[in-house]
Amino acid sequence: MAVIGAGPGGYHAAIRLGQLGKKVVCIDRDEVGGVCLNWGCIPTKALLHVGEVIRHIERAAAIGLKVPKAQVDREAVAKFKTDVVNANVGGVKTLFKANGVEFVRGQATFTSPSELDVTSQDGGTARIAASQFVIATGSAPVDVKAWPRDGETIINSDDAVKLARIPKRLLVVGGGVIGLEFATVYRRLEAEVLVVEMMPQILTGTDLEIGKTLGRILKKQGIEIMLNTKVGAIEKRGSTVRATLNGEGTANKDETREFDMVLVAVGRRPVTDNLGLRAAGLDVDDRGFIAVDRQQRTNVAHIFAIGDVTGQPLLAHRAMKQGVVAAEVISGDKSAAFDPVAVPNCIYTDPEVATVGLSEEEAKAAGYEVRIGKFPLAASGRARTMNEAEGLIKLVADAKSDLLL
């Protein structure tokens, strides 16, 4: 069995196949752990934790503690993040070894529906034949051609997590999950942060009320947010960047502002370049995602696909579950299937946003007569004892059946 991609989906599929007695090779052009462990979920959460501690220090006086202002040692923070990443990556390598999974580093390319060429970094090529394949190549940040990324002043999320420097003024293009998480990180590290979102709300697709509530809280924390606003030209000027903004946030007039860094967080794309999908006979949709059924099969019966490469939602734990499903289907379990009805999601801003199931808007669009239950955290004794009383819990139900949606 060949698993292409060693991120959360790929390593779960490979390990489960190994547990089920299969001979498995897992191939990745980068490091074990994929984006999640190396450049995404894990390092960003380490940095967000640093920011959370800073916030607790800043608010300590409110609960009767006199604590000196936090002094940020950027290199030490970066080392903490790297140590966390290395520990997690090492853990996956240990699990590979314990379950008989062979790891090969290189670019995998289908040459036929049953064979791969794997090109290593030194240019050498090895051919691998397998009876079953699992594609778990994930996603990558969308780069905008008009704003060429240089990794220093115009960056994407992969660059942002390296914490090479802390800008005084940061422009975040995109008010989605990634943009807001990094806005939180860099604001805690004392950057002035502006988030520009072209849509009427942040976190498009999340419950509207929850998104608005988070927006108000982030603004109170000092993060500036412009909605219904577009970023036009971004011009590098030495060590700074000049950006032109236009929309509701600028009274619908062109406004030029200077920043030390611009983070482009406008979405992610499936990583299928150089994979040789056509040689394998695989189809993709108009956005490049690979279509699969509930058992994670593609249009080629012995080739499976899991995780971000199969489309929204782009979540590590979704990929993990799909990887286990694919492994069990390959091993003969005809009942194994992925059920997307209740995939949980968490946005690691501060406060965090946790959701599962349908938003109020999605439920109404699906034709439900909706019943809403809400509980403000200001009414929670536990929240007040923690001095964390902003936000709410919201339930969306079917008024006819009382089924929680």
Image: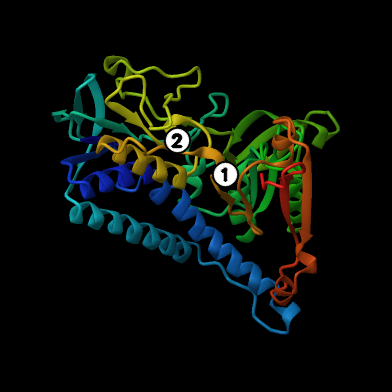
Q: Secondary structure at mark 1?
A: helix
Q: Looking at the picture, which amino acid does disc 1 mark?
A: Ile
Mark 2 neighbour class, 10 Å CA radius: few under 14, some 14 to 19, many 20 or more: many
Measuring from the top left, give residue 133's x and y in whole percent: 26, 30
What is the number of callouts on the image?
2
Q: Earlier in the sequence, mark 1 or mark 2?
A: 1
Screen quadrant of the N terminus: top left
Residue drawn at (72%, 73%), measured in percent from left and top? 387
Task: List the residue tagged with mark 1.
Answer: 178
Verify CB contact (< 8 Å) between mark 1 and mark 2.
Answer: no
Q: Is residue 304 left or right of residue 126?
A: right
Task: List the residue tagged with mark 2.
Answer: 308
Measuring from the top left, give residue 360's x and y in whole percent: 74, 41
Residue 331 falls in which quadrant of the image? top left
Q: Is residue 155 left or right of residue 395?
A: left
Mark pair 1, 2: CA separation: 15 Å
